[in-house]
Amino acid sequence: MPVYSMTGYASVQHGASATGAETDVRAPQTRRLGLEIRSVNSRFLDLSFRLPDELRATEPALRTLLTARLKRGKVEVRAALDNEDSSALQDPPARLLQRLNSLQDSVRAWLPQAAPLTVADALRLCANAPSGSEDWGDVLPALAEEALTALMGAREREGKRLAAMLLDRVKQLRALAQQAGPLVPALVEQQRQRFMERWKEAMALSDGNATVPEAARDRALTEATAFAIRIDVAEEITRLDSHLDEIERLLKKGGEVGKRLDFLIQELHREANTMGSKSAALELTRISVDMKVLIEQMREQVQNLE
């Protein structure tokens, strides 16, 4: 199953030749239905619709269609009806002109001082009225299915790119963990040698008093042990490798992995922080900082996955 991004865009159009019912209409008016679906990242599935009045009744069907295939994301659906040639002036249907004239007579019967309709008023009102016999309510669901398929394709392509980037960061984190592993034994041995030198110095200063060097040796061994425990990052490296294995498994499995990956990224950041706090060498500090930079890059991209 592929990994899907929550970011995507799709646009489709459907054209129909609509003619008025009246015989005096000289030329058919071609209307076009355009549909756009945009989606960005969100913690949950958030749907919003911007539909013309003629298509308001289709919103429940569109909502059902989207919720069946989308799980997360802020999704906006926008539909528009317009004339194919918006610059062409169409003849207004005679039925609408008759209706406007009747309404004007009724209004002026009650309001004699009301100004009569102008030609521009009549054309504007006729242009805003629905025209044609096309049942857009039947066309829109099929058009939405086409747009949703295109949107899913765009989200899949973006998800594939994000998954490749995440796998690359996983590879880099493993390399850094491998660099950190051998550093700890060397640091422990270096510190042990330092403690032993201090013990020998204590023996040289004891002047035959056996209790002083013995106490110094015990103290040196205790400090060496505490130091080794304090800087040991083997447990952190083991957990980090385990989290990286799980990230790889989820990316290969696909599906709805965004929330799980986000949790694993938080765990990676915690292990990297712990490694930095245990650092006893500049090289180990650098590795911890490099890890946190990579993990932050992963966090930004994981938040875009469904």
Image (cartoon, grey):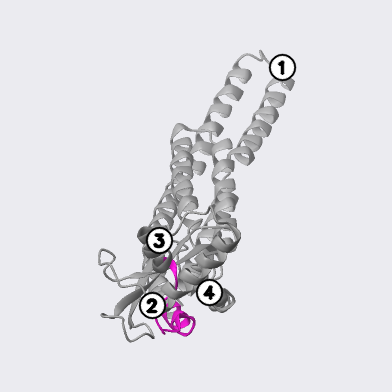
Question: Up-down: is 169 above or below 228?
Answer: below
Crowding at mark 2 (Cα within 10 Å: few <14, some 14-19, many 20+): some
Q: Which mark, by number, is residue 254? A: none
Query: CA separation, marks 1 and 3?
Result: 69 Å
Q: Is residue 155 left or right of residue 200?
A: left
Q: Residue 292's x, y, as percent?
A: 48, 43
- Residue kind at label 3, given as amino acid type: Leu
Crowding at mark 1 (Cα within 10 Å: few <14, some 14-19, many 20+): few
Of the residues tagged 1 and 3, which is closer to the observer?
3
Q: Residue at x 44, y 70 (%)?
A: 129
Q: Residue 242's x, y, as percent?
A: 55, 61
The earlier-in-sequence mark between 2 and 4 is 4
Of the residues tagged 1 and 2, which is closer to the observer?
2
- Residue kind at label 1, given as amino acid type: Asn
Q: Which mark, by number, is residue 66? A: 4
Q: Residue at x 36, y 59 (%)?
A: 120
Q: Identify the residue position indicated by label 1 in the image.
A: 209
Secondary structure at badge 4 equals helix
